[in-house]
Structure formats: structure tokens, C-alpha cells
Amino acid sequence: MTAPHPRTRPKGWGGVGAMATACVLALVFALVLTCTGSQGRSPAKTTGESVSHAERAQADEECTAPEKQTLAPSAADGPTIAAIKSRRGEKRKLIVGVDQNSYRWGYRDPNSGESGRLEGFDIDLVHRIAEDILGDRDAVQFKAIPTDQRIPAIQAGRVDMVVRTMTINCARIRDVAFSAPYFKTGQQVLAPKSSPVTGYDESLADREICTAAGSTAYSTLEADRKTGRLPESADIGTTVPNQLDCLVRLQLGEVDAVVTDGALAASQAAQDPTVELKGAAFTTEYYGVAMKKDADDLVRRVNRVLVDFRGDTAGGWESSYASWLSATLGRDSAASKPPAPQYLRTS
């Protein structure tokens, strides 16, 4: 029987100072945005829709490239957008589910002058969508939601959409609709620099791995352990509501490694110089904006916004990447260019 490896605790977070700092981080990022009740929804069916629901259902069943299972862009309003625009007074806002503790994606900077302001790449995209639909980039009600509540929040109508580093995959497109992809990434391993873990390989044997509940990371680990790609002795039982909780557990030495999207892992490594990415990405994934399954007009509108966002050289995709992600992902990396969209066939 293989003896368990001793956990390697990151240096630089030692003793009481480590516990205090980590707990403060957890407390700061656990604050939840004030939110109102769910808004009513009208069934959405875009006039002149070129892809039928039957065709899309068939595409779901034959899913091999989920990032291509989206509708062509359109600037036309439909029932879903009309319902958003009909909100009155303070409620006339786009309601968006986001993260508030993913550094450089959607997070609250405790050192910023504006208390409570959300910042990051995903937040820039939300403002762009709100400006297009409501004419005001700040007409947004942000709702902080944990990873495993992204789909339920959409289905229950608590949010109009989720913009939260959400991977498009075949299982999810049965429950929600996605925009075209706006970012390309892949799963990677994050561990202390001093750790013998070398990547997604045999070095994870007998190690305790943390993932976010409801994430593609967990489902990938679960599948790979059954096929033998991940060592059977790897412990994948530690799941948390939010990805930052994994970093805190890693800092406290409670787990040996974290598996998450490489884009998020790089940002976490930027938060803590005692940890680093181990090995290359072992999957290819795309982030998309998630919406209600039948909100076709909203899906098409968001895809139209993404066309403009990718093409805007002054304040669009590349500008946002330079502001938030180039420091952690590089200026000339594979992630530094927006993925090219592909849409369901038209007829």
C-alpha cells in the first residue's frame, strides 16, 4: 500500500499570519451583492428565426463542438429584450450573474478607491452588453452567484444571463443557451512552487485535489479517473462553492493541488507568488455568455455585441485583455486573441 505523501505547505504564508490573511481574503470575497427578487420572463421566439428548436435539439443530441451551437448575430429586438427594456425606474437594468472573487475576471479589489465596484474582463463585457441593449453601460444589476448555481439562476429567471468564466460544454447546452465563445482556455493544475506535483500526470497519485462544485474541472477529473488518465488514488472529494476557496485551502495546506481553467489559475498565481501552474493545459475549452434556453433574441443580440467587441480596437476585446489578463497570460499567448465564432447553419 502506498504511503500518503506529506502535504507541502506553501512558504511565505506561514503560521498565524497565513491563517489570518487567508481568512480575511475569504471574508472579503464572500460578501454577496445586494439583490432583488426574480424578474418575470416572456417566452422568447425571435421573429424570422432561421434555426428551428427541433434543429437545435438535434444539434444538442449530436454535440461534438458545443462552442459552435449558437445562433447567428442579430441586432433586432424580440420578446426577451422587450421585457428587459420594459422595466421601470431603478429596475430598468440588465440582471447579470457574475463572480466577485475571480481576480482580473470579476472581482472586488479591496485596495481600490471605489468600495464595492466590480472589475475585470467579464465585467467589461457585461457593461458592453448593457450599453448596447439599454443605452447605458452602468444599467446593470450584478448578482454574485456560486459556480454550481449558474444554471439554476438562469432557469429560475433570477438573472437575464451569466457572464462568469462559464465553459460551454455539451451537458450545459441541454439546459441553457450560450453565446458564441469569447475566450479560449483549458484545464490546468495549480500547486505550490515547492510541491513535487508536475502537472496532470502520475504526480497527482495520492494527492488531494480541490475543484469548484458544478465546474467542468470536477466532471473532467471524475471521468478521467474512471478511464485511468488520472491516477485512481487521486482524491477529488474536495469541492467548494467558489474557486477562490480552493486557493485558500491550498494556502492553508488543506489540499495538495487545484484544478481549474488555466485562465483562472494564472490569475490565482498572480494573487499568491508561492503557487504556480504545473504542466500544460490538458483540455481545450471556451467561455460563453449563458442565457435561458429559449431566449433566442437575446442570444442573437449578445452575439452581435460580441462581433463589435472583438472588432473594436480602441475599447473592445483586445483593450480589455491588455488591461486585465496580459500580465498573467502574456501579450502574445494563444489566449491573447479572441476565438473566431461559428454559428449553427442557416436556411
Image (cartoon, helix red, strand yellow):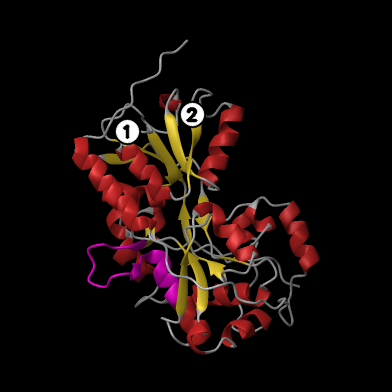
Amino acid type indicated by mark 1: Gly
The x, y position of residue 235, in whole percent, is: 48, 29
The answer to if 119 sits in the magenta stretch is yes
Q: Nearer the viewer, residue 232 or 154?
A: 154
Reply above or below: 44 against 145. Answer: below
The answer to if 6 sits in the magenta stretch is no
The x, y position of residue 68, in whole percent, is: 62, 60
Question: In the rendered image, which quarter contains the C terminus?
Answer: bottom right
Q: Is residue 82 left or right of residue 323?
A: right
Label 2's element?
A: strand
Query: In percent of the image, x 33 and y 71: which residue is there?
Result: 117
Tell me the magenta residue range. Answer: 107-127
Amino acid type indicated by mark 2: Asp
Most distant residue in the top direction: 1
Find residue 110 and report its image quarter.
Answer: bottom left
Q: Is residue 334 visible?
A: yes
Query: In percent of the image, x 22 and y 71: which residue is there?
Result: 113
Residue hosting label 1: 253
